[in-house]
Amino acid sequence: MSLKSLLEAGKFVVTAEVGPLKGTDTTEIKEVAELLRGRVDAANVTDQQSSVMRLGSLATCHLLKESGLEPVLQMTCRDRNRLALQSDLLSAYALGIENVLALTGDLPSLGDHPQAKPVFDLDSVQLLWVIKRLNEGYDMVGNELKGKPNFLPGAVVNPGADAGAAFELQLIKMEKKIMAGARFFQTQAVYDPDAFAKFMKRVAGFGIPILAGIIPLRSVGMARFMNKNVAGIFVPEELINKMAEAEDKAATGIEIAANIIKELKDICHGVHIMAIGWEKKVPDVLDAAGL
Amino acid sequence: MITITEQKPLEEVRQYLDRCKGVYIIGCGTCTTMQHTGGKSEVLEMKDKLEAAGKKVTGWMVIPTACDELTREALAENAKDIEAADCILVMACAFGVQTVNFHIDKSVYPALNTLFVGKEKGPTDFTEICIQCGECVIGQYAGICPMTWCAKELLNGPCGGSKNGKCEQKPEHDCAWILIYERLKKLGRLDELKEFAPPKDYSKMKRPRTLKVSPL
């Protein structure tokens, strides 16, 4: 079943993230596709994540599809203006890619080409609106399309934003994304299921499927780095201690991720596993979570 | 409102002047004097440095406001020393450099980088206030400009990178969206944040921008 049908049927959905590498060697992508096929419902392909230049999302989505894995095209507004974004969306659909995750994108200044000119011609809400217009058969200025796509547009939300203004702004933006056409959400990584449950209560009225983000921990350093540098990620001290005491860090990281998934299973509509270089461990996480 | 500048590295200035035998230096009595990037003392400092590097400085002056039309008269008054030079080094913002360039048939080089149009928060603290997008939107954002203050120029709310109320690009910089939220809240206008902001019309920023108005 397609991601769209699964979400519409209210099934618990599992997606994973695939990050292309820098270069034209696609061996690993094919290996990962082989491992994930049949285990996840769809795989997101990142769009030059962290503003580090790599193989593109569109080409990688096509390779995943050829390998029998349903892709979700991640599309950021960082590098392309409205002409290029719309054209790439049409190109993606012509290649049979039906899911798009609309993102603003990271700042180029934080990546490996900090001298790059940032584009941000559109923002993520406007990009969702553009996808909706394309689905209706028109480009964003109202010209009719010859052959229209039928995308499933998705968006992201950060449930761990700082309490107060930052959190309220996340909710306001989430509502705007839904109004602009988002049909599902994937979230920033969740490590505190209780805090996430509170978020789910706040957004229950939106009536939209939400896939909780999962990043398996690999080390204490990784957890501390994310706590210090990544907005909205908070790994509780208890989990950091568990990693510190563990003899087999990999097994413990997988076990923690699986336990979080088990706790989330009844409070959201799916999980999105972002393994960040550890894609081959995703089946182990799913096994441990009983999925 | 002033034009914010910084001095170029001396090496870059020296490369410009490589082929010049004599150089005339012009400073500006307004913005660059205030910021100590091109006032009298910086002009004299530059003169010493260039002379130490073996350049002949034929003269110097600080024009009260290098970007205005009196610059032409100031250049005429100092024509003799300027004539003795084969290039002009201008320690003013880009407006001043271009005004000098317009009035003189010699090579004109900038000694400063023009960074932005901004205001003074304190004697050592300057902040950009407007990127001149040509389609002012601050009415929707409680007077705080997301085109200037948000690193991604977002119009529909913050990205996910806001942490402790600060921007991930510059951790000392307040997230524009937190400022907008707090101010709209204070004004009882938070509901306006839910309105969809359509894509901006960047054709208003087509360069070079010119404007002709009807005479009064």
Image (cartoon, grey):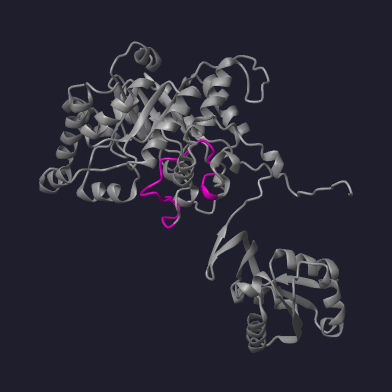
Image location (x, y in percent) of residue A26: 41, 34
Magenta range is B149-172
| Residue situated furthest right in the rendering | B215
Residue A288 lies left or right of residue B69; in this view the side is left
Residue A174 showing in the rendered view: yes
Residue sitting at 29 percent across and 14 percent down? Answer: A11
Q: What predominant SS class does the magenta segment belong to?
A: loop
Residue sitting at 79 percent across and 70 percent down? Answer: B100
Q: Quadrant of the N terminus of chain A?
A: top left
In the rendered image, residue B161 lying in the magenta stretch gets the answer: yes
Image location (x, y in percent) of residue A25: 42, 38
Instruction: Indicate whether A20 appears above or below B113.
Output: above
Image location (x, y in percent) of residue B26: 74, 77
Residue A258 lies left or right of residue B87; in this view the side is left
Residue sitting at 56 percent across and 35 percent down? Answer: A122
Residue sitting at 29 percent across and 19 percent down? Answer: A38
Residue A49 or residue B92, whichever sits in front: B92
Residue A108 or residue B174, whichever sits in front: B174
Residue A129 lies left or right of residue A45; in this view the side is right
Instruction: Indicate whether B7 appears above or below A174.
Output: below
Residue B11: quarter of image: bottom right
Residue B12: quarter of image: bottom right
Q: Quadrant of the C terminus of chain A?
A: top left
Image location (x, y in percent) of residue B20: 75, 79
- Number of labelled discs? 0
Residue A62 showing in the rendered view: no
Instruction: Indicate whether B189 appears above or below A185.
Output: below
In the rendered image, residue A45 lying in the magenta stretch gets the answer: no
Instruction: Indicate whether B49 appears above or below A238.
Output: below
